Every structure is written in C-alpha cells, then in structure tokens.
Image: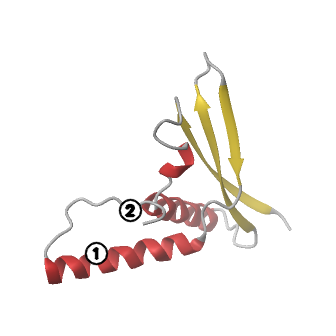
Amino acid sequence: MTTLLFVEVKTRKSDLWGAPDEAITLEKSKNIIDASAAYIKLFRLEHLELRYDSISIIGTPDTSHTIEHKENVISLLDKFQYYERKRKSSQYKKNNGTWGSMRWGRGY
C-alpha cells in the first residue's frame, strides 16, 4: 500500500539547547495533524496510509552539519493528549487559579 508522508524539518545552528525535533510540541503535533487532515480531505486521499516523520539538521551550510531522519515521530494520540492537557488546564484555572503561560512539550 502507498504511504502518504508528512515531514517536519527543524534546524538549529547547534544542539546546545537540544535536538531540533524536540521542538515538536503537542500543540505543533496537533497543528500538523489538522493540516494533514485538511490536505487528505481536499485531495481525497483517505485510502492512503499516513506517516509523520521529522528531519533534524544541526549546523549551517558554511560549517559541518548533521542530518537525522526519524520515522513516526507524531501519532494521532498526540492530538488526543493535546486536548486532554488543554481540558485539564482549563479545569485547573477554573478551580485553583491560573498556571499563566505554560508551554506543553514532550515528556511533561
């Protein structure tokens, strides 16, 4: 069967602040899933299998660089987890105050 591949490409000059693909948060995953769903619907590609990959590039064209390809970095579960955290966050704000501007990243 044919696979439709969506790839998120992230770059960094160095890995001092972490790998580029670590910047793919739950919110970013949700946006990618939503955009891919619109694309699939627009072009009637529901019959294809899906895969979400990432390509991380560390370095610059003028210096040495590394390129890493990871398969299946986003799952449809990410979208569910995003909404679940958003729901819990709104309940917290209603009941106990506010968390302020909290960023949701992988592993929280």
Amino acid at pointer 1:
Ser
Q: Residue at x 62, y 42 (%)?
A: 56
- Circle 1 sits in a helix, a strand or a loop, which is it? helix
Amino acid at pointer 2:
Trp
Which x, y percent locates residue 2?
83, 63
Callout 1 environment at 10 Å: few (<14), some (14 to 19), or many (20+)? some
Q: For the C terminus, give its image quadrant.
A: bottom left
Q: Residue at x 50, y 54 (%)?
A: 24
The residue at which mark 1 appears reads as 89
Calculate the distance from the C-alpha at mark 2 to the C-alpha at mark 1.
11 Å
For residue 89, side relative to residue 22 (left or right): left
Labelled disc at residue 10:
none
Which x, y percent locates residue 66?
67, 32
Which x, y percent locates residue 6?
65, 55
- Circle 2 sits in a helix, a strand or a loop, which is it? loop
Labelled disc at residue 104:
2
